[in-house]
Structure formats: structure tokens, C-alpha cells
Amino acid sequence: MAIIIDALLDALKDTAWALPFLFAAYLLMEMLERHSELLAGKLFRKREYFGPIIGSALGLVPQCGFSAAMSNLFCGGVIQVGTLIAVFLATSDEALILLIQGAVAGTVQVGPIIKLLVTKFIAGIVFGYILNFIFRKRKSGKEISDICQDEHCGCETSKNIWKPALIHTAKMIVWIFIICFVLNILIMLVGEETIATWIGGNFFFQPLLTALVGLVPNCAISVLFTQLYITGSLNFASTVAGLCTGAGIGLIVLFRVDKNKKECFITLGLLYACGAITGLILNLFS
């Protein structure tokens, strides 16, 4: 019973953090749909040039709210895949909060925190631009209206953007809550000690494992990586690899909204590859 209660509380916390970001994203999407010619032209005409930089900066904000919001924008064809990956790579879920708390308590130095943020920021920018260049000729063929039609939000009949945005947000929050609740129970049943043992040790190819575990869309994984790093059980390169792929709720939103599941798995594979490569490169210089 205690496991269920803890899983429930953690799921509520995760969805509460994501709520304002998702609502803001859906409001923006409604604005773009109704004023696409004006807003899309002025706000996103040069997104391929500045997208990865902006995405990496937004991803550094604690929690994974922006990763969820940007997943929606990607599914609506507003941003490119490189920009989305940049957000994912820079996202640290709860890791940054734990490190800041440790710095305040005097158990963690400020240097490693800055090093982590700078590394993830740079990784997001570099891989973001590389992927945008590789897929520059690929047209998504996606429109914001496609999401609205799938969700039956009543955009066509609503006189304002608030009601459709609320409908989108409510449906997504329920889905996120269910997934987070189930994942919390599974992680508690498996045990964080078991996961720590599996990825434990310090060897060159360890980032391949931490990047794989980091794909689990749950903040408990980022917390585990951070705790292992603070105690010295996980080196910096492996920690970065795991936190780079820890996009959290962003991945849940991506697989929920994007009807093209092949594209979802390609994006997931790109995220894993970028996170693992970042960790391996850091191992070379450590």
C-alpha cells in the first residue's frame, strides 16, 4: 500500500510541474493555427537558425516542463527535430534541483553544477544543429490542425483559444499521470539499488548503459543518477549521458501526440545516440 501511495504522490508532483508548460504550449499552438500566416512568419521564420540555441537554453530550466511543451510544438510541425533533441539533451529533470540543494547545504560544490549545465547546453546546440542540417530537406507534413482533429477539442466552433487549450491540456495531463504512476510502481518494485548495481562501476562504455536507462521517462532515474554522482559511484561522463537522454515527460508527450510512431522511435534513437556519444567523448578527456 505504501508503494502505491508514494507512486501516486510522485505522479501527481510530475503532472503538476508539467501542467503550466503544457497549457502554455497549447495556447501558443492555438494562436499559430488561427493566425498562422502572421505569427508563423514573424516568430518562426528563422527557427532553423536559432532553434537549437533557444531549445538548449529552455531545456536548462529545472524539471521537464519545456521538454513536454516542445514535444507538442514538434508534433504540430512548428519546430524541427534537431531543436527538439536540443531541448531533450539540455533537460535535467530534477537533477539540477538536487544539485542546487546540495550546494546550499554545502555537500556539493558549485563547480560541478556549472560544468554539468555548460556541457548539456553545448551538447544540445551541437547535436541540434547537426540534426537540423541532416534533416533539413525532410518535410514533416504535420500541421497543428492535425492534432486538434485527433483530440476533438472543438477549435472550429470555439470563439477563443482558452477552451481548446484547456481540453488539450486536460487530456494530456490524464495520460501523463497514468504513465508516471505505472512507471513509479515499476521502478519501486525493481528497486533503485538494483538499477544502481546494474549501471555501477566506472568503465569506458558505461555511458552506453546510463544513456539507455536515462530514456525511462521518470524523474526517479535522474534523481538516482544525481545521487550516484554526488556519492562518487558514477563518473561525470556517465552521469551526463544518463541526464542527456532523461527528457522525462517530453517523451511521453511525443509518443502520445505524434501519430507517426516510426518518427517517434527515430527521435528516441537519435536522442540515445546523442546522449551516449556525449558521454563517450567526455570519457576520452577524463
Image (cartoon, helix red, strand yellow):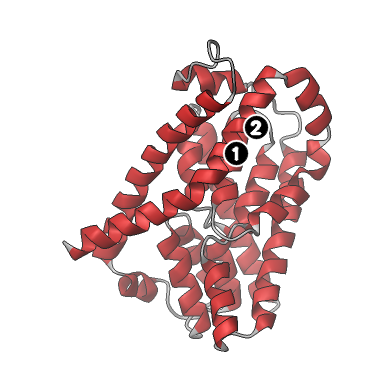
Q: Give the residue at x 55% y 63%.
A: 243
Would you say 59 lies left or right of 132 here? left
> On screen, 266 above or below 106?
above
Local SS, label 2: helix
- For label 1, count other residues whose C-alpha is less than 10 Å away and answer few (under 14), some (14-19) or many (20+): some
- Please provide percent x and percent y for residue 283: 63, 74
Q: Are marks 2 and 1 in contact (CB under 8 Å)?
A: yes
Q: Quadrant of residue 42?
A: top right
Tell me the quarter of the image containing the N terminus. bottom left
- Please provide percent x and percent y for residue 175: 38, 38
User: Which residue is label 1 attached to?
Assistant: 24
Residue sticking out furthest to the bottom: 106
Residue 127 shows in this picture: yes
Using the image as rendered, state which of residue 27 and residue 52 is in the foreground.
27
> On screen, 99 above or below 252?
below
Using the image as rendered, state which of residue 278 and residue 169 is in the foreground.
169
Q: Give the residue at x 28% y 64%.
A: 188
Local SS, label 1: helix
> On screen, 198 above or below 271?
below
Q: Give the residue at x 53% y 60%.
A: 93
Q: Report the Cα–Cα distance between label 2 and label 1.
A: 6 Å
Q: Amino acid at mark 1?
A: Ala
Would you say 186 lies left or right of 118 here? left
- For label 2, count other residues whose C-alpha is less than 10 Å away and answer few (under 14), some (14-19) or many (20+): some
- Please provide percent x and percent y for residue 84: 64, 43
Q: Amino acid at mark 2?
A: Leu
User: Which residue is label 2 attached to?
Assistant: 28
Tell me the quarter of the image containing the C terminus. bottom right
> On screen, 68 above or below 136?
below
Give me the disc on residue 241. Answer: none
